[in-house]
Amino acid sequence: MKQLISLLIGFLIWLPAIGQQNKILFNDQWKFHLGDVTNGAALSFNDQKWKDVSLPHDWTVAGPFAQQWASATGYLPGGIGWYRKTFQLPKEDEKTKWTIYFDGVYKNAEVWVNGHHLGKRPNGFISFYYDLSPYLKSGNNVLAVKVDHREFADARWYTGSGIYRNVYLLKQNPLHIATWGVAFTTPQVTDQEAKGHVRVNLENDHAAKASAEMEVTLLDGSGKVVAQEKKEVMLSGNKQQEIQTAFTLAKPQRWSVDRPYLYTLAIKVRVNGKAVDEYQEKVGFRTFRFDADKGFFLNDRSMKLKGVCIHDDAGALGVATFENVWRRRLKTLKDGGVNAIRMSHNPHADFFYTLCDELGFLVMDEAFDEWEFGKNKWIAGWNVGTPGKDGYHKHFKDWATKDVKDMILRNRNKPSIILWSVGNEVDYPNDPYSHEVLSGGNNPQIYGKGHLPDHPPASRLGSLSKSLVDAAKSIDTTRPITAALAGVVMSNTTSYPTNVDVVGYNYQEYRYAEDHAKYPARIIYGSENGMQYKAWLAVDTNEYISGQFLWTGIDYLGEAGKWPNRSNGAGLLDLAGFPKPEYYFRQSLWAEKPMVYIGTSPVPHGDDNGIWSHKKADPVWSKDFGAQQRVTAFSNAAEVELFLNGKSLGKKSKKIVNTGFIYWDIPFEEGKLEAKAYNQGVEVAKDEIRTSKKAVKLTYQDLETDPSALLKEILITAVDENNNPVYSANDTIEVQIDGQAEFRGMENSDHQNLASYLSPTNCLFKGNLLIYIYKKAADKKIQLHIKSKSFPAITVDL
């Protein structure tokens, strides 16, 4: 460890049990310049005036929001950015193999070391790496990265710009385990025993052949060795060879959504008794299958996929997010009854999958949102005006096969992953593919009217999907391949649905029965679905439908409406990662722990049956909603009783309604509104809201309890004299930080808030504001000062 610290300038963290054990976080002491420069990769280039940044870094989220940019990507800019990092190499390490590993750079990332061009990766979501060794020297070395995101309207959602995920330096012996070179499979799992199969790619960069010993060990959750195999191998010079081994585990603990038990797979490679490489990764034992008639089974138990789709960003942080932020978000979704995550519509950061393994989520990992032709990227608002066509399709021909393979190579040992998706809505009718069948029938998602003969033919979907499926299966045959279909009626005229193993239907519940009868061998599930109760009933009442994935789990930047709306509010959680009323409705359908939630709204006139419509039930009891108000209760209990200032307004049961929730229309009366939920007459849960008075002060909550976490989340809430939250508070707040910390933004979850995310001044929204602070030094004191003209100032010691 001392040698590594002396080797590199910067704050380096040893990362155990994350694939390669010799991964070193390489995130600190980078230089950044927004805009293009001449000779920016040269060793002699003077970067002293460039900005100091720590990764992950997203320059786009700094904005400012402006109407000149695209609604699709959140009315935020793109551009060109340069990064440089200087580090030192002691002379004794010149013969060590060094690899630089980027988890994700958006996009068109070109990398140089000491002026030598290492390569370019167009895809902004795919991890990649380069061998630095041939170009390193003792003393100072310079790594340079150019990021080109001038095509800012190149996606249908916010992508961010820059080195927005972690960067690692890999220190390796010339004889080592190849990056992504371990494949772990479980060909047999029963309660009595499990078979583990391990394939390891060993690289020997020496010219001479070498004899080595490979030791494969499996440790249980307590660190006890439960299986071990050793193998003597002879490696040819300058060659990569695959070594296989297997072991048997007695009475395996199975990984499941309720009990995500993980083992540690440890591999050591020795030459002449000396360890030359080590590897650790968390793995799990589970079985799963999809059945065309019976749906989905995990460990031989029938279950429904209760899933949500998510994008990469976290509001004010953009896509430069942190593991602890997503841990909180995913735990909240888990508490809401969610058991599955769709990584829409691209591979996500490495820690997402680790969290899903640990927390017990089933994962659909997805490669692309478009193939050979560009989809519509809206500029002036969703489905408004003339769309743009920039995007990944320009690189599809040259890169798609490698990109889908690399996605699977990186993540193939994750027990949480059950599906590889090769595409999302690539068959969106007339965007771009078309067919005569679109001139008739029911086509709920269609761009334009009827068949557009000047568009590419739908038949292309068959040949392209076949090539992508073949590429995926060349890496992994243990998981089914899927795709999310938007134009099933059109795709059914091609081989596309039969090329994939499991067919996802986006917003086409009405086709389930017809297609199940017409294609009895087809496995069908909802790959993207709205919040409507009837969409869930189509899953819950049909045994052959495996589940659904709601659009979406969390609000996200981009895919926005007309200016000034700059983000999408379809999520169960808001941009700050907190539950919205719709979350509690879903919890009432999906969660097992007894719960009840009450909220209010004006008495509606007619029903809103939009695909993404949310139930109106704000957690507020105020005269603002009128003299007569609707009180809505979401609960998974049999009955709910409503009380107003201690007086019962009666019990109601969900069994007598077909909406999935119950409500009362009552006159407003200041005080306390309380709901009690009952099963068989026994109270099992309760909830209450109170009429609040004028906000008089601010309170704060540090949401991150781990003192070692680099990013802090501080929640500010306005309360009245009785400490009741004041939902209507929208006062302006200003923050100041003292100490070794960096302000990373504020999020109030207002989709029309155009204040810069990096402004130290922002306003409360619905009474709350979330502040992000990056700690430059884990053990140093930090003070956060919160000021407002409306409230007394407060100081938070971190």
Image (cartoon, rainbow, N blue to C red):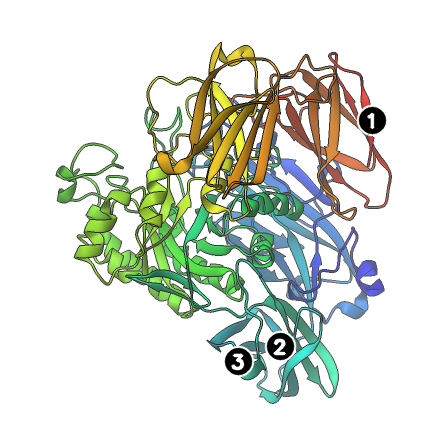
Q: Secondary structure at mark 2?
A: loop
Q: Earlier in the sequence, mark 1 or mark 3?
A: 3
Amino acid beneath label 3: Gln
Closer to viewer: mark 1 or mark 3: 3
In this view, which residue lies farthest toward the front? 681
For the question of whether residue 459 can be seen, the reply is: no
Q: Dot 3: few (<14), some (14–19), or many (≥20) neighbours within 10 Å?
A: few
Q: Earlier in the sequence, mark 2 or mark 3?
A: 3
Judge by depth and name the residue closer to the eye, 5 or 365.
365
Position in image of residue 427 (x %, y %)? 28, 46
Q: Secondary structure at mark 3?
A: loop
Residue 17 shown left or right of residue 680 in the figure: right
Report which residue position mark 1 lands on: 795
Rendered image: mark on residue 192: 3
Quadrant where the C terminus sits is top right
Amino acid beneath label 1: Thr
Residue 755 shown left or right of residue 777 in the figure: left
Q: Quadrant of residue 562?
A: top left
Residue drawn at x 34%, y 66% as measured from the top left: 470
Judge by depth and name the residue closer to the eye, 182 or 96.
182
